[in-house]
Image: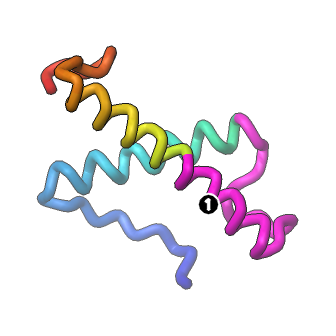
């Protein structure tokens, strides 16, 4: 993969929002862990375990949101939803 940064602005605001969120999450991760994702101290199995844990967390968030919608309650921070 090419490590060169390409600065191409999308005409899709959703994509721009995702890019901004990726940059924000990267900064949070660097501050929290002091290492970029390009680190080489983890084995593939470690990366897969991290991904599985994140996926399970996501499933929990989705289920909680579904439960709130099905019960007629809005999630606490739903804003305009």
Q: Quadrant of the N terminus?
A: bottom right
Which of the 4 image quadrants contains residue 6? bottom left
Q: Is residue 43 magenta?
A: yes
Instruction: State the residue at coordinates (53%, 55%).
Output: 55
Which of the 4 image quadrants contains residue 66? top left
> Which residue is labeled 1 in the image?
51
Left or right of 2: which side holds 52? right
Q: Is residue 75 magenta?
A: no
Q: Main secondary structure of the magenta part?
A: helix
In magenta, the rendered stretch is 32-56
Q: Residue 2, relative to residue 16: is it above or below?
A: below
Q: Residue 48, relative to residue 14: is it above or below?
A: below
Q: Residue 73, relative to residue 61: is it above or below?
A: above
Residue 30 placed where, x, y %? 68, 43
Viewer-nearest residue: 74 or 4: 74
Left or right of 47: which side holds 56? left
Instruction: Tell which residue pokes out farthest to the front in this image.
Output: 71
Left or right of 73: which side holds 54? right
Instruction: State the residue at coordinates (35%, 64%).
Output: 7
Instruction: State the residue at coordinates (76%, 75%).
Output: 44
Residue 69 placed where, x, y %? 21, 29
Q: Quadrant of the C terminus?
A: top left
């Amino acid at each position: 993969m090419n490590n060169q940064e390409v600065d191409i602005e999308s005409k899709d605001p959703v994509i721009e929002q995702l890019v901004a969120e990726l940059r924000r999450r990267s900064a949070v991760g660097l501050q929290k862990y002091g290492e970029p994702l390009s680190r080489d101290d983890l084995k593939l199995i470690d990366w897969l375990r991290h991904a599985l844990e994140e996926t399970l967390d996501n499933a929990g968030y989705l289920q909680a949101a579904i439960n709130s919608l099905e019960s007629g309650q809005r999630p606490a921070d739903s804003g305009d939803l």
